Image (cartoon, rainbow, N blue to C red):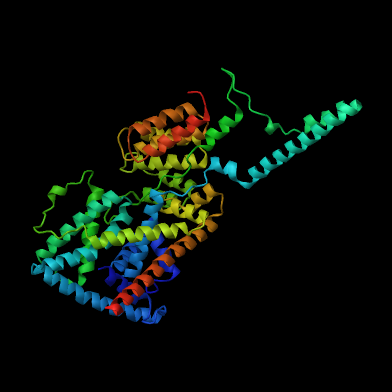
Amino acid sequence: MNNCTGAPAEKFAMDYLEGTLPEDEAEGFENHYFDCPVCLAQVQMLQSVGEELGRRPAALPTPATRRVLAWPARIWALGALAALLVVSVAGYRIFESGRTRPGFATTAQEPLKLNLPPQTEPEKPQEAGATPPAHAQVTASQLADLALPAFVAPNLRGSSEDARFLEGMKAYSSGDCAGAVTALAAVPAAGAQARAARFYSGACQMHLGNLAAATANLRTVAEAGDSPEQEAALYYLAQTALLGNDVPHARIWLRQTVELHGDFERRAKAALARIGALGVPK
Amino acid sequence: MGSSIVREFFAACFDGDGSPKMSGEHQEQDLLLAEEAAAENTRLVLAIGNGDQGAEREFALRFLPRLRAMLLARTRNATVAADLVQDAMIEALCALRRGQLREPGKLTAFVLAIARNVLNSHFRTASRQPESLEFPDNLPDLSSIDERMQSEQRESLAARAIESLDPTDKAILQMTLVHGLKPGVIAERLRLNPDVVRQRKLRATRRVMEFVAKASQNALSNHSVAGKKR
């Protein structure tokens, strides 16, 4: 750790703050930066950047906004506009020529209808009792927050975590959801980490798209009563419901999340507002 | 306090003429710094044992930022970290007043051990019991003006560093530091390759570090200019 101004130290500091550094290395790094102003300044600066980004978050490209802003969508929109322009000019010319040469009018107007892309048709107001438009369902599933809940390893000396739980969470932390589900399934149901194992397993199942398994796991945790995972379980239950386009259940679980007034309250409120904007009947 | 940290930082990173140190010289410098730190620790521990209030304040000023950085990194919760910093500092001061540190040169390891115990207690107990702590008399002011100023400077530096980042790099740093997401998940959200995310994260980290280095150099040159004027 002598080369403190180089990239390895920067990477070391970032891994430490992310909680991905093995415990012995994390302790070693702490022993070091308590006496090393260079590394201390790096750790403090990264923490300040994190706090600043937490206070004034940068605009993240969410799936919803990406559909509007991403270049394929823009090209599609430009294409539609260009087609509309061509059609308008051609229509005008045909109309003008039709006035002088009526014989061309009917034959020239036919392809105009064919050239109109179906997406450019104006939306009709939805009739009462009619099924919601297909795009509303797609948007509901795209609103789901797929970010895996952060797991902060307690990293305590002498802690009594189940080895299978730790193995599962190691896989989870590295983004290996399938591996995490397998390892967490081996955690004894009566063990101290059983509920946490079910929660993270549920989150992984959601991420993998196994919605029924995700709902079963998360529901068990949410319905088991007060626990550190209860609020998060409700929130991710709602996300699982959204993924399955089950907006009514998503609403119920998001409201229950808000009622707990915990860490997920703001996110749940924001999700409810986004669902409200969909216009899906309650 | 502020200028001494800058001096330490500059001495650890650069030669007298401002050029970066080579790795061999770093080793030598590290040894020198370790010897100086051990001597300084011994002086501080003995002074606190003798009831020197100034030494207690010096101790607090030195270890508060370190404890805050460590406990914030471990808890990821600024409020909890602030409470634990106070607890660790009080425990350390009480122990030093009672002369419980046998080897004064190992002050850093002693403070770290106390901080880790405080952290362990926090995680093990559902509700914390601050009343069980024995509060010492004449506790030094733990809300240092110097430290607050440095923290404000760091905040403004962080804001400038963030401004200088590419929007995607900014998003990656935010997802990493604020939301605690792993590169695989970030890659999925931003529709990027996970290796690209790792690369961009490292690039953004380096960019932030450049700001730290530049600010430290500026602070030192301002400090030197002020010294010459006097």
Query: Can I make out residue B148 in this image?
Result: yes
**Residue closest to the eye, B175 or B188:** B175
> What is the x, y in percent for residue A27?
31, 63
Q: Residue at x 19, y 54 (%)?
A: B87
**Does residue A37 lie above or below A266 as drawn?**
below
Q: Residue at x 46, y 49 (%)?
A: A58
Farthest-out residue, top: A129
**Residue closest to the eye, A107 or A275:** A107
Q: Residue at x 16, y 57 (%)?
A: B90
Q: How many numbered discs?
A: 0
Is A261 left or right of A274, judged from the image as shown? left
Query: Can I make out residue A15 in this image?
Result: no
Quarter holding residue B228: bottom left
**Residue closest to the eye, A263 or B182:** A263
**Residue closest to the eye, B155 or A249:** B155
> What is the x, y in percent for residue B181?
44, 50
> What is the x, y in percent for residue A251?
44, 29
Quarter holding residue A74: top right
**Does residue A198 lie above or below B106 as drawn?**
above
Is B97 left or right of B29, judged from the image as shown? left
Q: Quadrant of the N terminus of chain A?
A: bottom left
Is A89 left or right of B135, judged from the image as shown? right
Q: Residue at x 17, y 46 (%)?
A: B129
> What is the x, y in percent for residue A155?
32, 55
**Does residue A130 lie above or below A262 as drawn?**
above
